[in-house]
Each structure stands twice: as C-alpha cells, then as structure tokens.
Image (tube, rainbow, N blue to C red):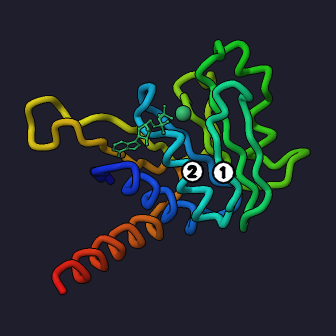
Amino acid sequence: MKIFLADTEAMLRLGMIIGEFLTVGSVILLQGDLGAGKTTLVQGIGKGLGITEPIVSPTFTLINEYTEGRLPLYHLDLYRLEPQEVLSLNLESYWEGVEVTPGIVAIEWAERMPYKPDSYVSISLTHGNQGDVYDGLRQAEITPFNCTIDNIVAAIYSKILQVRSQSSG
Ligand code: ADP
Ligand code: MG
C-alpha cells in the first residue's frame, strides 16, 4: 500500500500502528534517502511496542536494542557500512532469534544488505514528485514479502476513518 505522510506527526502515527500489530520475528527493511523519515518511523514503531525510552538514530552505534516494550526492538542502521562489513554482522541471528531474544528487527539503509530474510516488510520512503499535487509530501510504500500485513493495513484504514469522522463532527 502507498500512503502520504503530511508531517513528522503522521510518520510517527504510522509507525505506532505498525508497532502495535507487528508479530514476533518481523523484519522491517527501510529504504529512503538521508532525511526521508526512516528513524522517525522507527520511533513510532517503538511507541507502538510500548517503549517509552527515546529511540535515537543508530547511525554511529550500528544497533540499538530496546527491551522495555511488548517485544524487543532491534534497530539497525547500515548507512556507514560496505556490504562486506554487513556480512560480518551476522544479521540473521536477530531475525532467527539465535542468541538474542526474538523480537522486531528494523533496519535503515536495507539496500546495503547483501542478503535478505525469507520474509520481511519493505517500507520505502520517498518524496512526492516536484510539480504534482503531492509535491514535497513524504510517501511510504509498504510491501510484504512472504508475509501478511493485512492487520496493519486494516488498522491504518480504520484510523484514517476515525480521524475523518472526528473532524467532520
Ligand atoms: P532518516 O532516518 O531517513 O534520515 P529522519 O527520520 O531522521 O530521517 O527524519 C529527518 C527529518 O524529517 C526529521 O526532522 C523529521 O522530523 C522529519 N520528518 C519525518 N517525517 C516527515 C514527514 N512525513 N514530513 C515532513 N517531515 C518529516
Ligand atoms: Mg535515520
């Protein structure tokens, strides 16, 4: 599904819905340029999981772990890595839950991954094309690979309808 996010708040709310409905072992692969909103979306996911600790960009730490929520959140950022270095991180131990408690894995700059899990949710963040109606607006395209996101899509639609009916009185 494709969805437009008017501002930071909308990006956080989308993340919160995703975080509320994700099941254990889910992998979210985030793509999009610097500043596209990847970390913001993961901050929302963290809130949705019930994490109150601030979620900060793992650009320099590579991985941040949050264990306070409904499920552990492993937040990675591969921006500074070459594919060869990504290999040495043994990423599969996170999504297979080997030696780490199974949880949710969210990876920024997933395009740097030399291999991907068998199933994952891809979220690609882009800007609307210059000149069209959506000029400057962020867009998220959410695509499941070998898994279902029906519950997340249903929750997104029901929230949109709630907001609409509230604002129309
Ligand atoms: P990334 O992790 O992709 O580099 P960030 O999540 O750090 O990007 O976001 C960069 C900036 O964009 C932040 O200041 C954030 O508040 C803002 N931002 C996030 N989502 C949106 C949006 N939908 N519309 C406008 N600004 C946004
Ligand atoms: Mg980031």
SS at mark 1 in the image: loop
Residue 137 shown left or right of residue 11 in the figure: left
SS at mark 2 in the image: helix
Residue 132 shown left or right of residue 83 in the figure: left
Q: Looking at the image, which is closer to me, 62 or 124?
A: 62
Q: Looking at the image, which is closer to me, 135 or 153?
A: 135
Question: Residue reaching furthest bottom?
Answer: 169
Q: Nearer the viewer, mark 2 or mark 1?
A: 1
Q: Earlier in the sequence, mark 2 or mark 1?
A: 2
Question: What's the amino acid at mark 2?
Answer: Gln
Quarter of the rendering containing residue 52: bottom right
From this view, report whether residue 162 is shown above or below residue 125: below
- Image x and y of residue 46, in percent: 62, 56
**Residue position marked by numbered label 2 in the rendering:** 43
Q: Are marks 2 and 1 in contact (CB under 8 Å)?
A: yes
Q: CA distance from mark 2 to mark 1?
A: 8 Å
Residue 143 shown left or right of residue 2 in the figure: right
Determine which of the numbered discs, if any, sits on residue 18 in the image.
Answer: none
Cβ of disc 2 within 8 Å of ligand 1? yes
Question: Residue reaching furthest right?
Answer: 99
**Residue position marked by numbered label 1 in the rendering:** 54
The residue drawn where x is 73% and y is 64% is 69
From this view, report whether residue 88 is shown above or below residue 102: above
